[in-house]
Image (tube, rainbow, N blue to C red):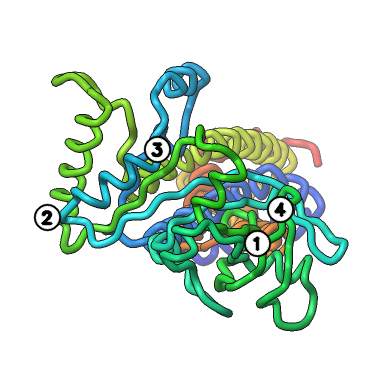
Amino acid sequence: MKLIEAFKLALQSLWGNKLRSILTLIGVIMGVASVIMVITLVQGANRYVSTKLSGYGADVFTVSRMPQVIFSAEEYLSYQKRKILRMDDYEAVKAICTDCAEVGALLNKSTNVVANGHSSNNTEVRGYTWTMLSLNNIEIALGRGFTPIDEEHATKNAIVGYDIVDNLLGAGDPLGKEIRVDGIQYTIVGVGERQGKTLGQSQDNWVAVPITTYQQNYGYNDSVTIYARAAGNAQVMAQAEDQVRVLMRTRRHNAPGTPDDFNLETNDTFLDIWKQISSLFAWVVLGLASIALVVGGVVIMNIMLVSVTERTREIGVRKALGAKQRDVLLQFLIESASLAVVGGALGVLGGILVGKLITIFVGFPTAVPLWAIFLGLLLAGAVGIFFGVYPASKAAKLDPVVALRAEL
């Protein structure tokens, strides 16, 4: 039997039982759609986070009391025992790190902002040194950034993100307008460029004030995060990190051979942590999707067994006319694989569509790699062939005499 003829017979059989074929495909469609959706979401998130982190510059590193990502309550409690980092530590790094081109410090918390009778929730108020805008890769769209004078005199000037402008200030020039942060009045002197969303969360809902003003209002017992930019290539970056690490260990009286009681992190650190988290998420969901694929495969096997029973006389006629066992086996395997591949194609389209809808309505980034499409089709075909072997083998082994005696 020619391969093309086998495909024709398989498609004719499937088309002749359209409703049954569609119901059979549901499991495969759901499994493949889940696989494609997870891959597109994870790939999109990885690419987006990588772009965002690289935007801060590969030459920037941070020093903080505890890491940005904590995986357990035990770790959090152990980090809470560490001494906080103070502005004196920032001043020491700025003075001693000869391989650092820029050094800045950041304090932040979430609060409410009020203006024109409107208020925003969960707005991040940031205490910035005057160098932090460039270290955070924030360009000024309107107005100006902070100056050393703002920091030195603890002015009541503020720089805001566009969520504040759009949601609180309304139309018109925002520069010179007043806002209240925790009841304290500030004058807007600058507006940062739009940052968009990261994983569906707006990056423009923030207000920055001079770090000295922040400490006057919220106290001096919050731990600062120190940012530093190396003054050169990767080798200089390593030297700058070593300088800062030795300085901080000395200031915090870390004994030789003991671990740091602070965290020095680079963008690569954050990216590696993110990839570990996203990979774990992907494997969990892919495991659940594989269950749907197995269920879909079992359904295909069941339907193919029913099909073999229904077509017993047809098989007997084919064998009586000279069809060999391998011809019958090939016919039913192709029918099973075709059924699964059609389901896989629909699953690929469904997974991509759901991913795009999530991007549109939630803002979660997606990316559809070409290999994911082929993977989805390959998985579907493999499921169809694997679960079609037994029904096809049963059909191929039918005795033609017994098959011809079967009742219609």
The tag on residue 86 is 3
Q: Which residue is mark 1?
A: 359
Q: Position of residue 256 (x, y in %)?
A: 14, 21
Secondary structure, mark 4, is strand
In the rendered structure, which disc, 3 or 1, sits on the residue that comes first in sequence? 3
Is any atom of residue 401 visible in this view?
A: no
Which quadrant is the C terminus positioned in? top right
- Dot 4 or dot 3: first in sequence order is 3
Residue 292 visible in image: yes
The residue that appears at 64% across and 49% down in the rendered structure is: 317
Which residue corresponds to mark 2?
235
Spatial CA span between label 4 and label 2: 45 Å
Q: Is residue 306 left or right of residue 219?
A: right
C-alpha span from label 1 to label 2: 39 Å
Q: Amino acid at mark 1?
A: Thr
Instruction: Give, as a three-letter code, the residue at label 3.
Output: Arg
Find residue 16 and report its image quarter: bottom right
Identify which residue is drawn at 54% across, 34% down. 284
In the displayed structure, 286 sits above or below 70; it is: below
Q: Real-space Cα distance between discs 3 and 1?
A: 41 Å
Front position among marks 3 and 1: 3
Disc sitting over residue 184 in the figure? 4
* Number of the front mark, 4 or 2: 4
User: Where in the figure is residue 367, as x and y percent of width and height?
Assistant: 52, 62
Against 379, residue 288 (above or below) is above
The relative height of residue 306 versus residue 119 in the rendered view (above or below) is above
Q: Earlier in the sequence, mark 2 or mark 3?
A: 3
Along the viewing direction, whichever of 236 and 96 lies nearer the viewer:
96
